Image (tube, grey):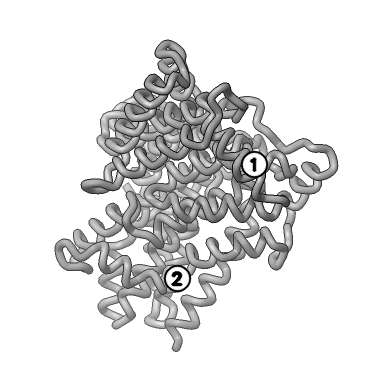
């Protein structure tokens, strides 16, 4: 059934509720319920239950839940073992200012490019031990972390993002079999949004781009009163430990990254073996007794429960939007206005809006590709430019959406409320998006 403009209502409800209540999880659940009520009336609970069960049984959902939960355990081990504290102490001795601590956060994010989940959680949880000492608001820390995580995963396609989008390019016959990653590499100069988002971060830190709106107020609050905006449920607080030394941080991190990369990129294998290595290291060097080690792992898992709940609600909401036909409706509405000159910018703007409003960074792009690529071929538009526009739109949705996985995890890592993080970083995400749209228009007209 074609629901037309009615398909916009669930997403509109989510955004309105989130802005009114400042509560993201409840808003997303309400949006899902409304979508199923529209489709099934008072029998909505049957489909809601069925879709939730199907989502839980999907391999992708199980993978995300396992990876995020185990990252919680891994980070808890780094924190409780004193590794994060020692790393922060070492950096603090070399950094003499707020600006230096934020630039160090940005640089660290450039190196952890395998996955935005790993980047958001690890960099945030580690660097708040440094930035807190310079009265950096947690919202500022979350902005720097989030604006580095997803962009880097797009620009360095040896990541979960690169594997996914490379496979889609091959599936849509835009890239030859086995050449998807190479096509993404060739499209990097046209990924204007992640490039701009990444560059704007240090410009904000050094003051070339001024602090704006809620982020400016958060920084003024932190400077004036020392109130950093710490979320009361922040479970990953970095504290000194008896065995605080940098090896307790670096060896587990090197093990995690090594096991993740070799022999091929596998985040779940990497975190399982990374935790195993850390447990053995801590036991051998007497950093923590066995009982405390396993208690720490459990505490780390518990700390991720709010995040996992949010991710499950998001996946159900994405399925609800797919069922009600939101993405198809928006694409069909814009398609008549697409010309060779306007195609890249309209693709970027349209899919950015859909990705932002639905919280689906990958799914909506997968739906758009079978429409966008044939149009590009028919109009003889540079295919790399279209690929760059689609992936940039995905990056914007991941970065800017109030309830996207990247936003939720960045807030969790930095220890601030999800809504506060989303609101404070939005002006900078919109700035990068506007500039990216201008670039797409100029390049297509050139």
Q: Quadrant of the C terminus?
A: bottom left
Circles 1 and 2: CB atoms closer than 8 Å: no
- Asked if 357 appears above or below 59 in the picture, the reply is below
Vertical relation: 378 (above or below) 28: below
In the displayed structure image, the side of residue 270 where residue 361 appears, left or right? right
Closer to the chain start, of discs 1 and 2, is: 1
| The quarter of the displayed image where residue 222 is located | top right
Q: Is residue 320 visible?
A: yes
Residue at 49 percent of width and 44 percent of height: 120
Asked if residue 304 can be seen in this view, the reply is no
Front-lying residue, 399 or 195: 195
* Residue at the spot 37% in from the left edge and 74% down from the top edge: 385
In the rendered image, the vertical position of residue 147 relative to residue 404, given as above or below = below
Secondary structure beneath label 1: helix
Seen as rendered, the residue at the extreme bottom is: 446
How many neighbours does mark 1 have within 10 angstroms: few (below 14), some (14-19), or many (20 or more)?
A: many
Spot occupied by residue 435 in the image (x, y as percentages of width and height): 57, 71
Which mark is drawn over residue 29? none
- Image coords of residue 52 (percent x, y): 35, 29
Judging by the rendered image, the residue that carries numbered circle 2 is 346
In the rendering, at what x and y percent does residue 158 appear?
Answer: 32, 56
Between disc 1 and disc 2, the foreground one is 1
- Horizontal side of 190 relative to 18 (left or right) equals left
Direction from residue 154 to residue 133 in the image, left or right: right
* Residue at the extreme front of the image, as rendered: 285
250 or 166: nearer the eye?
Answer: 250
- State the residue at coordinates (47%, 32%): 248
Residue 87 x, y percent position in the rendering: 56, 39
* Label 2: element kind: helix
Determine which residue is flagged by label 1.
130
Q: Report the front residue among 94 and 421.
A: 94
């Amino acid at each position: 059934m074609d629901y037309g403009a009615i398909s916009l209502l669930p997403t509109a409800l989510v955004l309105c509720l989130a802005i009114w209540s400042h509560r993201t999880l409840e808003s997303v659940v309400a949006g899902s319920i409304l979508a199923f009520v529209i489709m099934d009336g008072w029998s909505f609970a049957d489909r809601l239950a069925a879709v939730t069960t199907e989502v839980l049984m999907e391999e992708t959902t199980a993978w995300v839940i396992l990876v995020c939960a185990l990252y919680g355990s891994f980070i808890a081990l780094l924190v409780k073992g004193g590794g994060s504290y020692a790393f922060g102490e070492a950096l603090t001795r070399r950094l003499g200012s707020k600006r230096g601590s934020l630039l160090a956060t940005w640089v660290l994010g450039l190196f952890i490019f395998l996955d935005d989940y790993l980047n958001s959680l690890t960099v945030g949880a580690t660097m708040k031990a440094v930035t807190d000492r310079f009265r950096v608001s947690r919202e500022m820390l979350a902005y720097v972390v989030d604006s580095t995580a997803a962009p880097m995963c797009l620009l360095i396609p040896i990541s979960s993002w690169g594997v996914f989008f490379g496979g889609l390019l091959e599936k849509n016959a835009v890239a030859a079999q086995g050449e998807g990653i190479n096509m993404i590499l060739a499209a990097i100069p046209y990924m204007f949004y992640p490039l701009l988002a990444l560059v704007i971060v240090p410009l904000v830190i050094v003051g070339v781009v001024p602090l704006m709106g809620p982020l400016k107020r958060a920084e003024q609050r932190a400077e004036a009163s020392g109130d950093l905006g710490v979320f009361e449920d922040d479970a990953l607080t970095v504290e000194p430990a008896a065995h605080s030394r940098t090896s307790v941080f670096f060896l587990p991190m090197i093990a995690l990254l090594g096991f993740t990369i070799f022999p091929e990129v596998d985040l779940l294998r990497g975190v399982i073996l990374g935790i195993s290595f850390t447990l053995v290291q801590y036991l051998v060097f007497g950093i923590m007794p066995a009982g405390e080690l396993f208690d720490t792992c459990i505490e780390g898992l518990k700390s991720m429960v709010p995040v996992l709940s949010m991710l499950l609600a998001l996946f159900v909401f994405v399925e609800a939007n797919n069922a009600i036909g939101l993405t198809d409706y928006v694409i069909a509405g814009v398609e008549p206005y697409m010309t060779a000159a306007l195609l890249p910018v309209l693709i970027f703007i349209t899919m950015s809006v859909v990705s932002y409003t639905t919280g689906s960074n990958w799914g909506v792009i997968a739906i758009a590709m079978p429409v966008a690529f044939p149009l590009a071929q028919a109009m003889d538009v540079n295919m790399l430019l279209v690929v760059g526009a689609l992936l940039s739109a995905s990056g914007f949705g991941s970065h800017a959406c109030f309830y996207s996985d990247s936003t939720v995890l960045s807030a969790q890592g930095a220890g601030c409320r999800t809504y506060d993080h989303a609101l404070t970083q939005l002006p900078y995400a919109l700035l990068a998006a506007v500039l990216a749209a201008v670039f797409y228009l100029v390049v297509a007209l050139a």
